[in-house]
Amino acid sequence: MNKTDIRIADLPNFGPKSQQMLEQAGIHTVEQLRELGAVRAYVQVKRVGTVSLNLLWAMEGALTGQHWQVVAKHERLRLLLELEDVENEHKR
């Protein structure tokens, strides 16, 4: 399987429901997810539906090769601060 054959649901921390949420937000490929990054992708998904922060942890973990619980424990503050910055950009 080459890089372009990988589906979002095939990434660690993800399954069909996560893939469906991302697709509803216009994120259809792993490459799109990588280009956006976890925080911007989370904001995009949040615009079209209700999501928990667990999706943010899962996306960051999928992109960095970590389990979502490790991300939630060790990367939480950094991601929340980045999320705040991105959301404030959209309010301007």
Image (cartoon, rainbow, N blue to C red):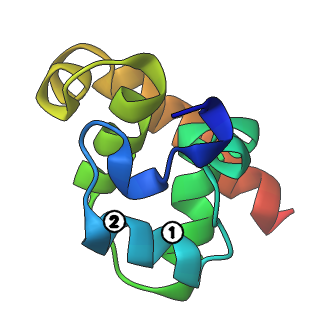
Q: Amino acid at mark 1?
A: Leu
Q: Amino acid at mark 2?
A: Ser
Q: Farthest front residue? A: 1
Q: CB of mark 1 within 8 Å of CB of mark 2?
A: yes
Q: Position of residue 85 (x, y in %)?
A: 66, 40
**Residue under circle 1?**
22
Q: Farthest right residue? A: 92
Image quarter for residue 51? bottom left
Q: Residue at x 49, y 53 (%)?
A: 7
Q: Position of residue 16 (x, y in %)?
A: 29, 69
Image quarter for residue 37? top right
Image quarter for residue 20? bottom left
Q: Residue at x 57, y 33 (%)?
A: 82
CA gap between label 1 and label 2 equals 6 Å
**Residue under circle 2?**
18
Q: Position of residue 87 (x, y in %)?
A: 65, 56
Number of numbered discs overlaid on the protein picture? 2
